[in-house]
Image: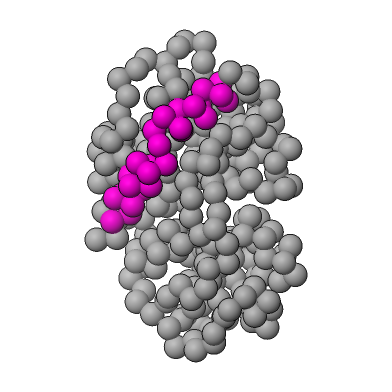
């Protein structure tokens, strides 16, 4: 897969980091291990450092809370299990499903997005409800919360390793609809220079969190959630949207 030049939203350069810059120093006894996946535009590695529109927000939250951290990128399954198994470890971005809720301590929501169905523009099918999708072939990524959501609603998605493969399958007529988060879907469509795929139906509004190991101290979780409130949802959304505009140019 071709990776884009992300230097414009790398560490220290993002609108989000400028907007939320905190000149505080973390306390030495408060330190978290953060894990994430390669999932642009939300998280990726740029010039050897973790970046992305969600990573920039996470950095700002940790700075506001005066908590030290390091970030490592893994495949999603490993990142998820690192946070599940190791103290003082948090994974992002994560949806708080009923299955996951008792397994972690939660910080957020950090980012809000929508899960949408994308289709080739020549597809004239009108979708008005989740039930309408039952007659069609749906594509999503393996092990994702979107896949679980579809299954919970009596739909049977075809799972593949990456969303990029779903773009190819949609173009080749192997699936009828691709279910993805709206921001990630729009980014992938633009980065692959595809001009015939459109969002056609919004399945659900979703919230993404930082999910922390259950042994993470309550005081740390409280400070992180207080930091989110201090930064304000409006400014976080403005920062995300500004970074997205930069990427989609």
The answer to whether residue 97 is above or below residue 221 is: below
Q: Position of residue 74 (x, y in %)?
A: 54, 41
- The quarter of the picture where residue 248 lies is bottom left
Query: Mostly what secondary structure, the magenta segment?
Result: helix
At a point 58% along the width and 79% down the height, the residue shown is: 128
Image quarter of the N terminus:
bottom left
Instruction: Give the tally of numbered discs.
Output: 0
The answer to whether residue 32 is above or below residue 35 is: above
Coloring basis for residues: one colour
Magenta segment boundaries in residue numbering: 220-245
At a point 46% along the width and 72% down the height, the residue shown is: 199
- The quarter of the picture where residue 105 lies is top right
Q: Position of residue 28 (x, y in %)?
A: 47, 10
Q: Position of residue 14 (x, y in %)?
A: 28, 41
Give yes or no for residue 142 being in the magenta stretch: no
Can you see residue 31? yes
Can you see residue 10? no
At a point 33% along the width and 52% down the height, the residue shown is: 241
Image quarter of the C terminus:
bottom left
Residue 186 located left or right of residue 35: left
Q: Position of residue 231 (x, y in %)?
A: 39, 33
At a point 40% along the width and 64% down the height, the residue shown is: 186
């Amino acid at each position: 897969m071709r990776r884009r030049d992300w230097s414009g939203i790398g560490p220290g350069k993002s609108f989000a980091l400028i907007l939320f810059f905190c000149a505080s120093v973390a306390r030495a006894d408060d330190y978290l291990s953060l894990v994430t996946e390669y999932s642009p535009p939300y998280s990726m590695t740029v010039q050897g450092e973790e970046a992305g529109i969600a990573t920039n927000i996470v950095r700002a939250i940790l700075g506001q809370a005066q908590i030290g951290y390091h970030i490592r990128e893994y495949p999603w399954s490993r990142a998820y299990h690192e946070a599940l198994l190791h103290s003082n470890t948090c994974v992002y971005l994560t949806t708080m499903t009923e299955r996951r809720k008792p397994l972690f301590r939660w910080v957020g929501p950090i980012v809000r997005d929508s899960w949408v169905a994308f289709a080739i523009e020549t597809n004239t099918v009108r979708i008005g409800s989740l039930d309408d999708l039952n007659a069609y072939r749906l594509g999503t990524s393996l092990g994702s919360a979107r896949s679980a959501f579809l299954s919970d609603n009596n739909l049977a998605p075809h799972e593949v390793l990456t969303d990029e493969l779903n773009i190819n399958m949609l173009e080749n007529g192997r699936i009828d609809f691709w279910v993805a988060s709206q921001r990630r879907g729009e980014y992938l469509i633009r980065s692959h220079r595809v001009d015939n795929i459109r969002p056609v139906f919004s399945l659900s509004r979703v919230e993404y969190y930082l999910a922390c190991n259950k042994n993470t101290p309550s005081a740390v979780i409280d400070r992180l959630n207080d930091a989110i409130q201090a930064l304000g949802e409006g400014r976080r959304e403005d920062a995300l949207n500004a970074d997205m505009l930069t990427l989609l140019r």
